[in-house]
Image (tube, rainbow, N blue to C red):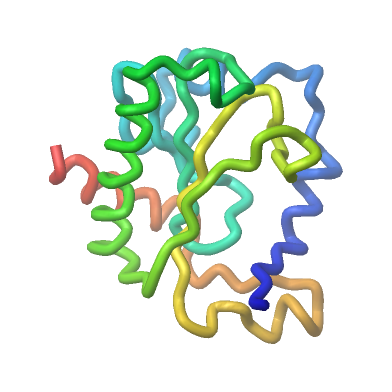
């Protein structure tokens, strides 16, 4: 069994304050897509980069509605989330050239959801042998490119995909 290690995410876990509001609700209300790493907005959901990624290009797709149960998604929300997933994979293939993807949701805190109150889908690009010795030996994850640089490249790809 392979494992995807992410010890650097401890910063997120330790500093996550649910009383500060829901970032998935707050970010789309702001006129600051670049700083919030929002790549594309749909009618019912949107795509943003994970600020605490498991790998370079880790994307999230939350619906605009603040819901936590997948059974509460409308047909329109379900369809758009899956359409955005395909669009994300196309953009990531073009920009990051991964060997594969992990795509899925952690539904509820018991399932590992960091933000359990607002449903969101993860798209994690993967490369053969992408678990590296730094995470194992020194509790450090090497992300080979700055988040803002990856954002710029992906934003160009998303804009080109229409």
Q: Quadrant of the N terminus?
A: bottom right
Q: Which residue occupies 15% across, 44% down? A: 161
Whether 20 is drawn above or below 39: the answer is above
Q: Nearer the viewer, residue 101 or 147?
A: 101
In the image, taking residue 46 as reference, residue 69 lies left or right, namely right
Q: Position of residue 35 (x, y in %)?
A: 48, 35
Residue situated furthest front in the rendering: 71
In the rendered view, tell whether residue 110 sits above or below residue 45: below
Judging depth in this view, the residue of 92 and 154 nearest the camera is 92
Q: Is residue 53 above or below residue 76?
A: below
| Residue 153 visible in the current orientation | no
* Outermost residue, right side: 14
Residue 155 is situated, as x and y percent measured from the top left of the image, at 29, 45
Along the line of sight, the residue nearer the viewer: 72 or 140: 72
Image spot of residue 31 (x, y percent): 41, 18
Q: In the figure, residue 82 lies in which quadrant?
A: top left
The x, y position of residue 24, in whole percent, is 56, 24
| Count of marks placed on residues | 0
Question: What residue lies at 57% left-to-right and 15% top-to-bottom?
Answer: 66
Report whether residue 115 is seen. Answer: yes
Q: Quadrant of the C terminus?
A: top left
Task: State which quadrant residue 140 falls in.
Answer: bottom right
Q: Is 25 positioned to the left or the right of 136 in the image?
A: left
Residue at the image point whose x is 52% and y is 47% from the top: 104
* In-image side of 74 versus 110 (left or right): left
């Amino acid at each position: 069994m392979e494992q995807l290690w992410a010890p650097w995410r401890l910063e997120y876990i330790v500093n996550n304050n649910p009383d500060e509001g829901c970032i998935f609700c707050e970010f789309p209300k702001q006129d600051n897509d670049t700083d919030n790493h929002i790549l594309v907005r749909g009618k019912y959901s949107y795509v943003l980069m994970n600020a605490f990624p498991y790998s370079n290009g880790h994307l999230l797709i939350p619906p605009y509605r603040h819901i936590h149960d997948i059974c509460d998604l409308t047909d329109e929300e379900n369809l758009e989330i899956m359409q955005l997933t395909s669009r994300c994979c196309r953009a990531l293939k073009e920009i990051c050239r991964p060997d594969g993807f992990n795509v899925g949701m952690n539904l509820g805190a018991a399932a590992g959801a960091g933000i359990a109150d607002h449903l969101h889908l993860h798209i994690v690009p993967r490369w053969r042998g992408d678990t590296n010795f730094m995470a194992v030996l020194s509790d450090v994850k090497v992300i080979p490119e700055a988040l803002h640089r990856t954002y710029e490249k992906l934003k160009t790809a998303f804009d080109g995909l229409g």
